[in-house]
Image (tube, rainbow, N blue to C red):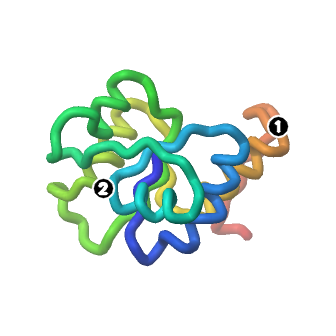
Amino acid sequence: MITVRDKDKLEMLPIAQKFYLKGFGIYATSGTAKFLEDNGIHVTKVEKLWEGQNSIIDLIENGKINFIINTPTKGKQSNRDGFKIRRMATECKIPCFTSLDTANALYEAIEDDKTEKDLDVIDITEI
């Protein structure tokens, strides 16, 4: 599931392309879906939370989402879709990437066939 703020769409494009070419199905809300389709990536458009059925919530509840890429907009308003999506992802134990760098690192780990055993936890404050 990809839903990113407008200013992140260009940066997100090569990441989405890599996942798409690797065979991942991509779900996206209307603005992100249109951007990806305009750039040659087939997506399944899903409704925003308030738009009705076939929403992100339905997909999460039905186990169709493996991870979410969602870049937050400014502000910490709990009534925004992004906030609710990230909260639901956390509650349902679905990885949610709010940084495109981290989403790209996920792709690199998948591409290299890394498993959890192959990865080390590091303290980023010591880098």
> Most extreme residue toward the top, as rendered?
62
Q: Residue, x 71% and y 47% (percent of image)?
A: 21
Q: Is residue 78 above or below residue 86?
A: below
Label 1–label 2 contact, CB within 8 A = no
Q: Quadrant of the C terminus?
A: bottom right
Q: Nearer the viewer, residue 23 or 5?
A: 23
> Most extreme residue toward the bottom, as rendered?
7
Q: Quadrant of residue 55?
A: top left
Callout 1 amino acid: Asp
Q: Residue, x 38% and y 45% (percent of image)?
A: 45
Q: Is residue 60 above or below residue 39?
A: above
Callout 2 amino acid: Gly
Q: Residue, x 45% and y 28% (percent of image)?
A: 64
Separation of marks 1 and 2 at Cα, in angstroms: 30 Å
Left or right: where 53 falls relative to 64: left
* Residue carrying label 1: 113
Nearer-N-terminus badge (1/2):
2
Q: How many marks?
A: 2
Q: Which mark is residue 49?
A: none
* Residue carrying label 2: 82
x, y percentage for residue 37? Answer: 50, 57
Q: Nearer the viewer, residue 124 or 31?
A: 31
Q: Secondary structure at mark 2?
A: helix
Q: Secondary structure at mark 1?
A: loop
x, y percentage for residue 91? Answer: 34, 34
x, y percentage for residue 101? Answer: 62, 64
